[in-house]
Image: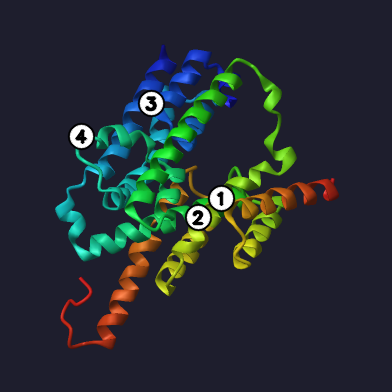
Amino acid sequence: MTSAGSGLTVWQSCALSLLVFTGASQFALVGALAAGGGAVTAAAGALFLGVRNAFYGLRLSQLLALPRAVRPFAAQWVIDETTAVSLAQPTRRNARMGFAVTGLSLYLLWNLTTLLGALGAEAIGDTALWGLDAAGPAVFLALLAPMLRTTTERAVAVLAVLLGLGLLPVLPAGVPVLVAALAAPAVLYVVGRRERTVRPGAPGGTR
Amino acid sequence: MNIWIAVAVTAVGCYAVKLAGLLVPAGVLERPLVRRLAALLPVALLAALTAQQAFADGHALVLDARAAGLGAAGVALLLRAPFLLVVAAAVVVTAGVRAVAG
């Protein structure tokens, strides 16, 4: 939607949404191009923002257990929203269903709004006016909440929030979230050490 | 032309990154440490992302109506409200706070 204002043609905007399909990366690319950045710099920033999708894929591939032939097609839909929905499902069947439904509906909606936005249909208006910009974090919170079952998960979430917000003012866009991912190995390390001190007789029991 | 190159590079790169995670061999994923790490990574990423969407404006941390909305969503979750109600609570409270604050 914002891309039309930064010198991209309708076709380029649509190609971005169809082919890249990772909101954060698209905005980064468009923003960098609009700011007069070179094509390479812009693309590098956008790629950096996309790295977290690899971590999602790691988890999703266990969860969904997709046949090898399907994976290249499923890959395009590995994003924040589909991961959050899939992880919130109780069974593999539901997780696959959640992934497919979320992926398809978001893909259609995202590309449709891009096309409308690029064509200059400003009728959608300002989402902030209606409080709709709070819907995103609320959806994530609702999907995240059931995952925070044990102290380990809660500790990871708290540490990640602190890292993500604390580093936001000082690091380039997209990097704080990646650094926040370090909360996972950090907490695992602490938990592992504690378990070893509690049960010194179990050699490498946590590995 | 330059823009098309940037679009193409980003598209190919972002797709490769997405695929990479899915293609990690099952053998590696069987190891307990990898398994636990893979389970915790999305928690960390989504938590950080949620916080940023609620409290960030570009590079600045802000406390605005969205925070009230997220708080309302949190309360709704604690009350075991259904999913749509949680999201609706966030939207309504955010809009309400904005209307009041002008």
Question: Could you say where residue A49 lies in the image, as x and y percent from the top left?
Answer: 42, 40
Where's the N terminus of chain A, which quadrant? top right
Q: Which residue is mark 2?
A: A143
Q: CA distance from mark 1 to mark 4?
A: 31 Å
Pair 3/2: label in front = 2
- Tell me the tag on residue A139: 1
Q: Measuring 47% from the left and 65% from the top, which residue is drawn there?
A: A159
Disc 1 chain ID: A
Q: Is residue A94 left or right of residue A173?
A: left
Q: Secondary structure at mark 1?
A: helix
**Please, what is the three-letter code of the amino acid marked with disc 2?**
Leu
SS at mark 4 in the image: loop
Amino acid type of the residue tagged 4 in the rendering: Ala
Image position of A116 (left or right of A180): right
Does residue A61 appear left or right of residue A147 in this picture?
left
Of A77 and A191, which appears nearest the observer? Answer: A77
Question: Residue A135: x and y, percent?
Answer: 62, 46
Q: Residue at 32%, 36% (x, y): give it.
A: A74
From this viewpoint, which residue is outermost toward the front? A93
Question: Which chain is home to disc 3?
Answer: A
In the rendered image, residue A189, in percent from the top left (x then y), is placed at 31, 70
Circle 4 is placed at which residue position? A69
Q: Earlier in the sequence, mark 3 or mark 4?
A: 3
Q: Residues within 10 Å of mark 2 (few under 14, many from 20)?
A: many
Q: Is residue A63 above or below residue A78?
A: below
Q: Which callout, 1 or 4, points at the residue further toward the start of the chain?
A: 4
Q: Nearer the viewer, mark 1 or mark 3?
A: 1
Residue at image coords 49%, 58%: A144
